Image (cartoon, rainbow, N blue to C red):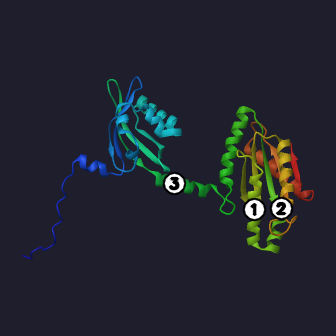
Protein backbone atom coordinates (compact mmCIF):
# COMPACT_ATOMS: atom_id res chain seq x y z
CA UNK A 1 0.00 0.00 0.00
CA UNK A 2 1.22 3.54 -0.72
CA UNK A 3 2.44 5.43 2.25
CA UNK A 4 0.69 8.77 2.98
CA UNK A 5 3.49 11.31 3.45
CA UNK A 6 1.19 14.32 3.95
CA UNK A 7 2.31 16.45 6.90
CA UNK A 8 0.34 16.00 10.06
CA UNK A 9 -1.14 19.32 11.30
CA UNK A 10 0.01 20.30 14.75
CA UNK A 11 -2.37 19.50 17.57
CA UNK A 12 -3.97 22.63 19.02
CA UNK A 13 -3.24 23.03 22.68
CA UNK A 14 -6.42 23.98 24.57
CA UNK A 15 -6.23 27.35 26.26
CA UNK A 16 -7.79 28.15 29.58
CA UNK A 17 -10.28 30.99 29.85
CA UNK A 18 -7.73 33.00 31.84
CA UNK A 19 -5.27 33.02 28.92
CA UNK A 20 -7.87 33.32 26.15
CA UNK A 21 -10.13 36.13 27.43
CA UNK A 22 -7.49 38.91 27.43
CA UNK A 23 -7.00 38.36 23.68
CA UNK A 24 -10.62 38.51 22.52
CA UNK A 25 -11.76 41.73 20.75
CA UNK A 26 -14.23 42.61 23.47
CA UNK A 27 -15.07 42.49 27.15
CA UNK A 28 -16.84 39.66 28.97
CA UNK A 29 -18.75 40.76 32.03
CA UNK A 30 -21.16 39.99 34.79
CA UNK A 31 -23.28 42.91 35.88
CA UNK A 32 -25.44 42.91 38.99
CA UNK A 33 -28.19 45.28 40.09
CA UNK A 34 -29.94 44.81 43.42
CA UNK A 35 -33.62 45.49 43.96
CA UNK A 36 -32.57 48.66 45.81
CA UNK A 37 -30.65 49.89 42.75
CA UNK A 38 -27.05 49.14 43.81
CA UNK A 39 -24.95 48.16 40.78
CA UNK A 40 -21.54 46.55 40.33
CA UNK A 41 -19.53 44.27 38.01
CA UNK A 42 -18.54 40.98 39.76
CA UNK A 43 -16.59 40.05 36.60
CA UNK A 44 -15.02 42.25 33.93
CA UNK A 45 -12.28 40.91 31.66
CA UNK A 46 -11.25 41.17 28.03
CA UNK A 47 -9.07 42.76 25.39
CA UNK A 48 -9.09 45.96 23.38
CA UNK A 49 -8.68 49.52 24.63
CA UNK A 50 -11.84 49.85 26.73
CA UNK A 51 -10.55 48.43 30.01
CA UNK A 52 -7.33 50.47 29.88
CA UNK A 53 -9.18 53.66 30.81
CA UNK A 54 -11.69 52.49 33.42
CA UNK A 55 -11.36 51.93 37.16
CA UNK A 56 -12.14 48.24 37.31
CA UNK A 57 -11.85 48.14 41.09
CA UNK A 58 -14.45 50.88 41.39
CA UNK A 59 -16.76 49.07 38.97
CA UNK A 60 -16.41 45.90 41.01
CA UNK A 61 -17.69 47.58 44.18
CA UNK A 62 -20.03 50.42 43.16
CA UNK A 63 -20.66 51.10 39.46
CA UNK A 64 -23.47 53.65 39.65
CA UNK A 65 -21.48 56.88 39.43
CA UNK A 66 -18.86 55.54 37.04
CA UNK A 67 -21.49 54.18 34.64
CA UNK A 68 -23.00 57.66 34.44
CA UNK A 69 -19.59 59.18 33.70
CA UNK A 70 -18.69 56.57 31.08
CA UNK A 71 -21.97 56.69 29.17
CA UNK A 72 -22.38 60.50 29.24
CA UNK A 73 -25.34 61.69 27.15
CA UNK A 74 -26.32 58.06 26.51
CA UNK A 75 -26.79 57.36 30.24
CA UNK A 76 -30.63 57.72 30.25
CA UNK A 77 -30.89 55.38 27.25
CA UNK A 78 -28.60 52.79 28.86
CA UNK A 79 -30.46 52.89 32.19
CA UNK A 80 -33.78 52.58 30.40
CA UNK A 81 -32.51 49.48 28.59
CA UNK A 82 -31.32 47.97 31.89
CA UNK A 83 -34.68 48.67 33.55
CA UNK A 84 -36.63 47.15 30.65
CA UNK A 85 -34.43 44.05 30.64
CA UNK A 86 -34.76 43.61 34.42
CA UNK A 87 -38.52 44.11 34.47
CA UNK A 88 -39.38 41.72 31.63
CA UNK A 89 -36.33 39.40 31.75
CA UNK A 90 -35.51 40.31 28.16
CA UNK A 91 -32.01 40.35 26.64
CA UNK A 92 -30.13 43.59 27.26
CA UNK A 93 -29.09 45.18 23.96
CA UNK A 94 -27.89 48.77 23.80
CA UNK A 95 -24.90 50.89 22.81
CA UNK A 96 -23.17 54.01 24.06
CA UNK A 97 -20.22 56.31 23.37
CA UNK A 98 -17.22 55.67 25.59
CA UNK A 99 -14.86 58.67 25.93
CA UNK A 100 -11.12 58.17 25.58
CA UNK A 101 -8.49 60.61 26.86
CA UNK A 102 -6.93 62.55 23.96
CA UNK A 103 -8.89 60.52 21.40
CA UNK A 104 -12.29 60.43 19.79
CA UNK A 105 -15.02 58.52 21.67
CA UNK A 106 -15.54 54.87 20.79
CA UNK A 107 -18.93 53.24 20.29
CA UNK A 108 -19.54 50.23 22.53
CA UNK A 109 -22.28 47.65 21.93
CA UNK A 110 -23.66 45.74 24.93
CA UNK A 111 -25.40 42.38 24.68
CA UNK A 112 -26.31 40.37 27.79
CA UNK A 113 -28.85 37.92 29.14
CA UNK A 114 -30.55 38.59 32.49
CA UNK A 115 -30.76 36.06 35.30
CA UNK A 116 -33.10 36.64 38.26
CA UNK A 117 -31.43 36.40 41.66
CA UNK A 118 -32.96 36.46 45.14
CA UNK A 119 -31.82 40.03 45.80
CA UNK A 120 -31.72 41.44 42.29
CA UNK A 121 -30.80 40.67 38.66
CA UNK A 122 -27.49 39.49 37.20
CA UNK A 123 -26.54 39.84 33.54
CA UNK A 124 -23.93 37.74 31.72
CA UNK A 125 -22.77 39.36 28.54
CA UNK A 126 -20.22 40.91 26.23
CA UNK A 127 -19.22 44.43 25.19
CA UNK A 128 -17.77 45.02 21.71
CA UNK A 129 -16.13 48.08 20.16
CA UNK A 130 -18.30 48.87 17.12
CA UNK A 131 -16.78 52.28 16.29
CA UNK A 132 -15.89 51.37 12.70
CA UNK A 133 -19.37 49.97 12.12
CA UNK A 134 -21.08 53.09 13.51
CA UNK A 135 -18.86 55.43 11.47
CA UNK A 136 -19.74 53.47 8.34
CA UNK A 137 -23.45 53.68 9.22
CA UNK A 138 -23.12 57.45 9.65
CA UNK A 139 -21.26 57.76 6.34
CA UNK A 140 -23.93 55.82 4.46
CA UNK A 141 -26.72 57.75 6.18
CA UNK A 142 -25.09 61.02 5.21
CA UNK A 143 -24.81 59.85 1.60
CA UNK A 144 -28.49 58.92 1.55
CA UNK A 145 -29.54 62.24 3.12
CA UNK A 146 -27.20 64.68 1.35
CA UNK A 147 -27.16 66.35 -2.05
CA UNK A 148 -23.69 65.49 -3.44
CA UNK A 149 -23.13 68.83 -5.22
CA UNK A 150 -24.13 71.38 -2.58
CA UNK A 151 -23.75 69.31 0.58
CA UNK A 152 -27.29 70.34 1.58
CA UNK A 153 -29.95 67.94 2.83
CA UNK A 154 -31.76 66.28 -0.06
CA UNK A 155 -35.50 65.77 -0.58
CA UNK A 156 -35.53 62.61 1.55
CA UNK A 157 -33.97 64.35 4.54
CA UNK A 158 -36.16 67.40 4.04
CA UNK A 159 -39.41 65.43 4.09
CA UNK A 160 -38.41 63.69 7.29
CA UNK A 161 -37.66 67.02 8.95
CA UNK A 162 -40.89 68.58 7.68
CA UNK A 163 -42.92 65.66 8.98
CA UNK A 164 -41.34 66.07 12.42
CA UNK A 165 -41.81 69.86 12.51
CA UNK A 166 -45.43 69.82 11.36
CA UNK A 167 -46.17 67.31 14.13
CA UNK A 168 -44.59 69.66 16.69
CA UNK A 169 -46.44 72.64 15.23
CA UNK A 170 -49.78 70.84 15.52
CA UNK A 171 -49.05 69.65 19.05
CA UNK A 172 -47.88 72.99 20.44
CA UNK A 173 -49.67 75.47 18.18
CA UNK A 174 -46.42 77.10 17.08
CA UNK A 175 -45.88 78.71 13.65
CA UNK A 176 -43.97 77.02 10.85
CA UNK A 177 -43.26 78.50 7.42
CA UNK A 178 -41.47 77.38 4.28
CA UNK A 179 -39.95 78.99 1.17
CA UNK A 180 -39.89 77.42 -2.28
CA UNK A 181 -36.96 78.88 -4.24
CA UNK A 182 -36.18 78.70 -7.93
CA UNK A 183 -33.24 80.28 -9.79
CA UNK A 184 -34.59 82.41 -12.61
CA UNK A 185 -33.66 81.36 -16.16
CA UNK A 186 -31.16 78.78 -14.91
CA UNK A 187 -31.09 76.96 -18.27
CA UNK A 188 -30.14 80.22 -19.96
CA UNK A 189 -27.36 80.69 -17.39
CA UNK A 190 -26.03 77.18 -18.12
CA UNK A 191 -26.16 77.75 -21.86
CA UNK A 192 -24.27 81.05 -21.62
CA UNK A 193 -21.68 80.29 -18.93
CA UNK A 194 -21.44 76.50 -19.04
CA UNK A 195 -22.55 73.75 -16.70
CA UNK A 196 -19.48 73.98 -14.47
CA UNK A 197 -20.33 77.61 -13.76
CA UNK A 198 -23.94 76.59 -13.23
CA UNK A 199 -22.82 74.04 -10.62
CA UNK A 200 -20.73 76.75 -8.97
CA UNK A 201 -23.78 79.01 -8.76
CA UNK A 202 -25.75 76.23 -7.03
CA UNK A 203 -22.96 75.65 -4.51
CA UNK A 204 -22.54 79.36 -3.76
CA UNK A 205 -26.30 79.86 -3.47
CA UNK A 206 -26.40 77.07 -0.86
CA UNK A 207 -23.63 78.75 1.15
CA UNK A 208 -25.16 82.24 0.99
CA UNK A 209 -28.61 80.98 1.96
CA UNK A 210 -27.26 79.04 4.93
CA UNK A 211 -25.39 82.14 6.13
CA UNK A 212 -28.70 84.00 6.49
CA UNK A 213 -30.45 81.27 8.47
CA UNK A 214 -30.54 80.25 12.13
CA UNK A 215 -29.08 76.95 13.28
CA UNK A 216 -32.58 75.47 13.69
CA UNK A 217 -33.59 76.33 10.10
CA UNK A 218 -32.99 74.02 7.15
CA UNK A 219 -32.30 74.69 3.49
CA UNK A 220 -32.48 71.66 1.19
CA UNK A 221 -32.02 71.08 -2.51
CA UNK A 222 -35.10 69.57 -4.09
CA UNK A 223 -33.39 68.97 -7.41
CA UNK A 224 -32.15 70.99 -10.37
CA UNK A 225 -32.30 74.67 -9.47
CA UNK A 226 -35.06 74.28 -6.86
CA UNK A 227 -34.52 74.65 -3.12
CA UNK A 228 -36.70 74.75 -0.02
CA UNK A 229 -36.11 76.56 3.27
CA UNK A 230 -37.91 75.31 6.40
CA UNK A 231 -38.37 77.85 9.20
CA UNK A 232 -39.73 76.56 12.53
CA UNK A 233 -41.24 79.09 14.97
CA UNK A 234 -41.60 81.54 12.08
CA UNK A 235 -44.78 83.30 10.96
CA UNK A 236 -45.71 83.99 7.34
CA UNK A 237 -44.79 87.67 7.67
CA UNK A 238 -41.38 86.85 9.16
CA UNK A 239 -40.78 84.28 6.44
CA UNK A 240 -41.72 86.81 3.74
CA UNK A 241 -39.28 89.34 5.21
CA UNK A 242 -36.43 86.84 5.24
CA UNK A 243 -37.25 85.67 1.72
CA UNK A 244 -37.07 89.24 0.44
CA UNK A 245 -33.75 89.73 2.22
CA UNK A 246 -32.42 86.55 0.56
CA UNK A 247 -33.67 87.71 -2.84
CA UNK A 248 -31.89 91.07 -2.55
CA UNK A 249 -28.70 89.40 -1.26
CA UNK A 250 -28.55 87.01 -4.23
CA UNK A 251 -29.30 89.75 -6.78
CA UNK A 252 -26.37 91.79 -5.39
CA UNK A 253 -24.00 88.83 -5.10
CA UNK A 254 -21.22 88.29 -7.64
CA UNK A 255 -21.21 84.59 -8.52
CA UNK A 256 -18.22 85.07 -10.79
CA UNK A 257 -20.43 86.20 -13.64
CA UNK A 258 -21.24 89.72 -12.43
CA UNK A 259 -23.94 91.11 -10.16
CA UNK A 260 -27.55 90.84 -11.25
CA UNK A 261 -27.09 87.74 -13.42
CA UNK A 262 -28.55 85.43 -10.77
CA UNK A 263 -31.99 86.18 -9.33
CA UNK A 264 -34.57 84.18 -7.42
CA UNK A 265 -38.30 83.63 -7.51
CA UNK A 266 -39.61 82.63 -4.10
CA UNK A 267 -42.96 81.37 -2.86
CA UNK A 268 -43.75 81.32 0.85
CA UNK A 269 -46.49 79.63 2.86
CA UNK A 270 -47.30 79.03 6.53
CA UNK A 271 -48.42 75.69 7.91
CA UNK A 272 -52.07 75.43 8.87
CA UNK A 273 -52.54 73.39 12.01
CA UNK A 274 -53.45 69.82 11.10
CA UNK A 275 -53.27 70.20 7.30
CA UNK A 276 -51.63 67.45 5.21
CA UNK A 277 -47.98 68.11 4.48
CA UNK A 278 -48.62 67.87 0.74
CA UNK A 279 -51.09 70.76 1.04
CA UNK A 280 -48.46 73.05 2.60
CA UNK A 281 -45.97 72.24 -0.16
CA UNK A 282 -48.57 72.75 -2.89
CA UNK A 283 -49.45 76.21 -1.55
CA UNK A 284 -45.77 77.23 -1.47
CA UNK A 285 -45.36 75.84 -4.98
CA UNK A 286 -48.34 77.84 -6.25
CA UNK A 287 -46.89 80.96 -4.65
CA UNK A 288 -43.58 80.28 -6.42
CA UNK A 289 -45.30 80.06 -9.79
CA UNK A 290 -47.15 83.28 -9.02
CA UNK A 291 -43.75 84.92 -8.49
CA UNK A 292 -42.65 83.64 -11.90
CA UNK A 293 -45.87 84.80 -13.56
CA UNK A 294 -45.50 88.39 -12.36
CA UNK A 295 -41.99 88.73 -13.75
CA UNK A 296 -39.59 86.76 -11.53
CA UNK A 297 -37.03 88.18 -9.06
CA UNK A 298 -39.76 88.59 -6.42
CA UNK A 299 -41.47 86.95 -3.46
CA UNK A 300 -45.12 85.86 -3.42
CA UNK A 301 -47.14 84.42 -0.57
CA UNK A 302 -50.35 82.53 -0.13
CA UNK A 303 -51.97 83.04 3.31
Q: Residue 137: x and y, percent?
A: 52, 54
Label located before the other in sequence (2 or 3): 3
Q: Residue 230: x and y, percent?
A: 74, 47
- Using the rendered view, name the quadrant where residue 165 is placed: top right
Residue at x 38% of width, y 46% of height: 52
Q: Within 10 Å of the Cα at label 2, are there few (<14), some (14-19), or many (20+) other Cα atoms?
A: some
Q: Within 10 Å of the Cα at label 3, are there few (<14), some (14-19), or many (20+) other Cα atoms?
A: few
Label located before the other in sequence (2 or 1): 1
As drawn, 272 above or below 295: above
28 vs 47, nearest the viewer: 47
Mark 1 and mark 2 in contact (Cβ < 8 Å)? yes
Q: Report which residue position mark 2 lands on.
A: 253
Q: Which mark is residue 299?
A: none
Tell me the element at label 3: helix
Q: Is residue 66 visible?
A: yes
Q: Residue furthest left?
A: 1
Q: Report which residue position mark 1 lands on.
A: 204
Mark 1 and mark 3 in contact (Cβ < 8 Å)? no
Find the distance from the CA under tag 3 to the CA under tag 1: 29 Å
Tell me the element at label 1: helix
Left or right: where 247 falls relative to 167: right
Residue at x 80% of width, y 50% of height: 179
Q: Is residue 286 visible?
A: no
As drawn, 302 above or below 67: below
Amino acid sequence: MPVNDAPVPPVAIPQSADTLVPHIPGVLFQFYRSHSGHMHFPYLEGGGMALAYVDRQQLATDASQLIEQLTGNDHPKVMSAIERSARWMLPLNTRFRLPFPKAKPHWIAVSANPEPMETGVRWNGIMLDITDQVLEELRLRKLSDTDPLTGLPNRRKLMGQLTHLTSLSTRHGTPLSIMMIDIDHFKRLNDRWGHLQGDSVLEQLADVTQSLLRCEDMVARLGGEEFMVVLPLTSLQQCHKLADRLRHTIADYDFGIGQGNVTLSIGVAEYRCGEPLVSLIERADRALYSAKDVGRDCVCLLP
